[in-house]
Image (cartoon, helix red, strand yellow):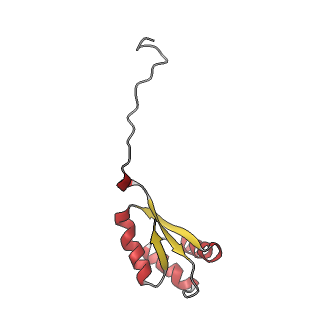
Amino acid sequence: MSEKSPLHKPEEVVEVSTLEDCEHEIILYNDDVNTFEHVIECLMAICDHTALQAEQSAYLVHYSGKCGVKTGSLDELVPKCSALLEEGLSAEVV
């Protein structure tokens, strides 16, 4: 096939993300200690949720046992997860 054939398409340059660039997630777990209000306040202050997002996440955690509350790089999420833990919430970065 000739290179000038209409079926020949130039190669696309595709960026390949490295392992460090992969998205990670903070998972928030249900507990019998924290109130809805405290969880909502923490999600708004620490994870930059809107009031509606925080409320929805709190209900998902309550009824499902866990919920992903923030995605991003490890550098961004580890301090946020630590702040949630300092507030008495149960969370981890995956």
In the picture, measured across the screen, residue 37 lies left or right of residue 83, that is right
Identify the residue shown where x is 36% and y is 66%.
Answer: 76
In the picture, measured across the screen, residue 69 lies left or right of residue 59, that is left
Q: Residue furthest top?
A: 2
Identify the residue shown where x is 34% and y is 65%.
Answer: 75
Can residue 27 be seen here? The reply is yes
Can residue 50 be seen here? The reply is no
> Who is closer to the viewer here, 70 or 93?
93
> Who is closer to the viewer here, 51 or 74?
74
Identify the residue shown where x is 38% and y is 61%.
Answer: 73
Q: Position of residue 77 (x, y in %)?
A: 40, 67
Count of marks placed on residues? 0
Q: Position of residue 19 (x, y in %)?
A: 37, 53
Q: Position of residue 88 (x, y in %)?
A: 46, 85
In the figure, residue 74 lies in which quadrant?
Answer: bottom left
Q: Residue furthest bottom?
A: 33
Q: Residue furthest right?
A: 63
Q: Position of residue 34 (x, y in %)?
A: 54, 86
> Who is closer to the viewer here, 31 or 57?
31
In the picture, measured across the screen, residue 89 lies left or right of residue 13, that is right
Where is the N terminus found, in terms of image quarters?
top left
Identify the residue shown where x is 37% and y is 35%.
Answer: 13
Residue 13 in the image: above or below residue 24: above
